[in-house]
Amino acid sequence: MTYLKEGDQAPDINSVDQDGNPIKLSDYQGKKVVLYFYPKDDTPGCTAEACNFRDNYQDLKDRGFEIIGVSADNAQKHQKFAGKYDLPFPLIPDTEKEVIKAYGVWGLKKFMGREYDGIHRETFVIDEEGKIAKVYQKVKTKEATEQILADFS
């Protein structure tokens, strides 16, 4: 699904978070960014993944990582989701799917015998120079942080 690969320049992001604060990937220059894409707020897998990042947030920060979540849910849903689970990182409401498509995570999905277009759960680690250091296409929602730290320890 993903057409971006390790070593590619990460597409810039010029958006806002759930609270309307501007988010630009270029503002994170000099830091490692965990940019994770997920299908929908408040669903079991997406909640497990977000809470895994929340529970390991300080450890990730201490190791130089910033976290940004992206889905096509609107800002109001993101605010509710972030508030309900006390998420300490920004969520981008990409209702127009600009960031989602720029990272190549929108496409055909299959679930219970049904095919439809949707967001693929993928995580990108972007290095300090804005290049993609790692792409995770098979994200373990309850072990998302552990997957990353195993590769960046």
Image: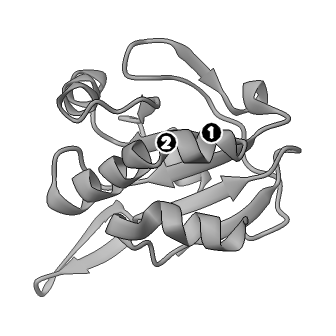
From the viewer's perspective, tell me whether residue 72 is left or right of residue 23: left
Q: Is residue 45 visible?
A: yes
Q: Which residue is mark 1?
A: 61
Question: Residue placed farthest to the bottom in the image?
Answer: 113
In what element is the residue under mark 2? Answer: helix
Q: Position of residue 30 (x, y in %)?
A: 85, 35
Q: Position of residue 60 (x, y in %)?
A: 59, 47
Q: Is residue 37 above or below residue 105?
A: above
Question: Residue placed farthest to the left in the image?
Answer: 112
From the viewer's perspective, tell me whether residue 147 is left or right of residue 78: right
Q: CA distance from mark 1 to mark 2?
A: 6 Å
In the image, which disc is placed on residue 26?
A: none
Labelled pair 1, 2 in contact (Cβ < 8 Å): yes
Q: Which of the pair 8/45 is nearer the observer? A: 45
Q: Position of residue 149 (x, y in %)?
A: 62, 65
Q: Quadrant of the C terminus?
A: bottom right
Q: Which of the pair 29/24 is nearer the observer? A: 29
The quadrant in which residue 133 appears is bottom right
Q: Is residue 4 visible?
A: no
Q: Is residue 149 above or below residue 150?
A: above
In what element is the residue under mark 1? Answer: helix
In the image, which disc is placed on residue 57?
A: 2
